[in-house]
Structures are given as structure tokens and as C-alpha cells.
């Protein structure tokens, strides 16, 4: 029987920047604090880009945060407004 890598119920932990040991939660925290570019994420975590392999992952997390913010601020459609009324 194989031992699972992640305990059942445990949240996955993803290292996005191996040079600086930045996880996805570190990056999401920097984005929540106002970072909007990879350089700002590194600055918020008091480090700097080394090899640059983390930049695509950071950009993906930034895009996801922008999409989530847009979805939260978008007005409900007519069908949704009717259902909510």
C-alpha cells in the first residue's frame, strides 16, 4: 500500500519560486496586500527574482486574482437579480 503524499483533508502546498522558497500562499498574500507585478511580489516578500522561472506562475496567480476581483464586483445579471429579489 502506498502512502499518500498529502494527508487526507490537508491543503496542497505549492512552491512557485524555488530560488526564494515562495509558496502559492506567500504570493497570494502579497497580491492581497496590493502587489500587481512579479517585482512587487518579490519586494513584498523581501527577496528578488533569481532565475525567473517563477514569473509565469506568479502571472497566473495575478490573473486569477484579477478575475476573482472582477467577478466579485460585477453586477448580477437580470436572471440572477430576479432570483435574488
Image (cartoon, helix red, strand yellow):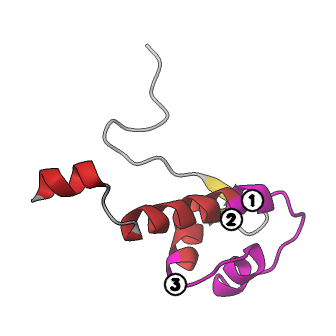
Separation of disc 3 and disc 1 at Cα? 22 Å
Where residue 33 appears, x then y in whole percent? 52, 84
Element marked by disc 3:
loop
Quadrant of image for the N terminus = top left
Q: Which residue is mark 2?
A: 21
Residue located at (72% from left, 76% from top) = 37
Where residue 39 appears, x then y in whole percent? 77, 79
Q: Are marks 3 and 1 in contact (CB under 8 Å)?
A: no
Q: Nearer the viewer, residue 74 or 38?
A: 74
Element marked by disc 2:
loop
Residue located at (74% from left, 59% from top) = 18
Q: Which residue is mark 3?
A: 33
Residue 47 against residue 76 in the figure, above or below: below
Q: Earlier in the sequence, mark 3 or mark 2?
A: 2
Residue 1 against residue 3 in the figure, above or below: above
Q: Which residue is mark 1?
A: 18
Position of 12 with respect to 61 (left or right) is: left
Q: Point out the stretch of residues depicted in magenta.
A: 32-59
Q: Earlier in the sequence, mark 3 or mark 1?
A: 1
Where residue 62 appears, x then y in whole percent? 63, 65
**Quadrant in which residue 7 is drawn:** top left
In the image, is residue 2 part of the stretch drawn in magenta? no
Separation of disc 3 and disc 2 at Cα? 19 Å
Q: Are marks 1 and 2 in contact (CB under 8 Å)?
A: yes
Can residue 54 be seen in this snapshot? no
Amino acid at each position: 500500500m502506498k502512502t499518500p503524499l498529502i494527508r487526507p483533508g490537508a491543503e496542497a502546498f505549492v512552491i512557485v519560486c524555488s530560488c526564494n522558497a515562495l509558496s502559492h500562499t506567500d504570493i497570494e498574500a502579497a497580491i492581497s496586500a496590493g502587489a500587481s507585478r512579479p517585482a512587487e511580489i518579490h519586494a513584498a516578500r523581501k527577496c528578488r527574482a533569481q532565475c525567473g522561472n517563477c514569473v509565469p506562475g506568479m502571472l497566473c496567480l495575478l490573473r486569477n486574482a484579477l478575475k476573482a476581483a472582477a467577478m466579485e464586483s460585477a453586477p448580477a445579471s437580470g436572471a440572477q437579480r430576479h432570483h435574488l429579489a
